[in-house]
Amino acid sequence: MSPRAAAFARGVVTAVAPAGRERAKNLLWAAGKLADYALALGLDLVPGVVLHPSTAERFTRCAPGLSGPARRTLRTNLRFIGRRVVPHLYPADLPLPRERSKQPYSAAEVSGYLALAARFKGCQTRSWSRTSTARPCPSSPAA
């Protein structure tokens, strides 16, 4: 990490004031990586530019050498920093709508599904029946 990127990372993470040492280390790593990326693009190391959602998103999508989980963690940490340092760029998330839960199945419905499943136990799907020999499935309710 370049000295300019490290100074930027220290500044924004200090503004965030994370709760613990480990959290601060994780945020410093994320901010430093993003700052190095911004320097390589020729961007000014100003929080409003570097922490802009489009810059952070592009970085998390094309940062080389990161696994999927590392990318998701990096993205989450950069959003966390951005929401606290430049909150006007990160609007609040809209709440997800809630639906009423469906009525539970009745005892008769559960019994019917279990009886049907027991009747077809061991049957193969059509794609399987073309490639292997399978036990014939019952073809009518009386079988």
Image: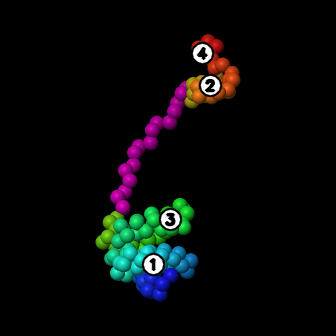
Q: Where does the image place residue 73, in percent across and percent down from the top left?
A: 51, 66
Residue pointed to by mark 4: 139
Distance, label 2 to label 1, CA atoms, is: 57 Å
Judged from the image, the secondary structure of the residue bearing numbered disc 1 is helix
Amino acid type at circle 1 is Asp
> Mark 2 or 3 closer to N-term?
3
In the image, which residues are magenta? 93-109
Which residue is depicted at the point 30% across and 72% down? 88
Q: Residues within 10 Å of mark 3 (few under 14, many from 20)?
A: some
Residue 14 visible in this rendered orientation of the protein: no
Does residue 141 lie above or below 65 as drawn? above
Q: For the residues marked 1 and 3, what is the alpha-carbon distance in whole angstroms?
A: 16 Å
Mark closer to the chain start, 1 or 3: 1
Residue in front for this viewpoint, 22 or 19 = 22
The three-letter code of the residue at mark 4 reads: Ser
The residue at the far top in this view is 142
Please report the residue visible at 37 percent of the width from the left and 57 percent of the height from the top: 95
Amino acid type at image mark 3:
Arg
The residues tagged by marks 2 and 4 sit, at their Cα atoms, a distance apart of 18 Å
Q: Which residue is mark 1?
A: 36
* Residue at disc 3, secondary structure: helix
Q: Which residue is mark 3?
A: 71
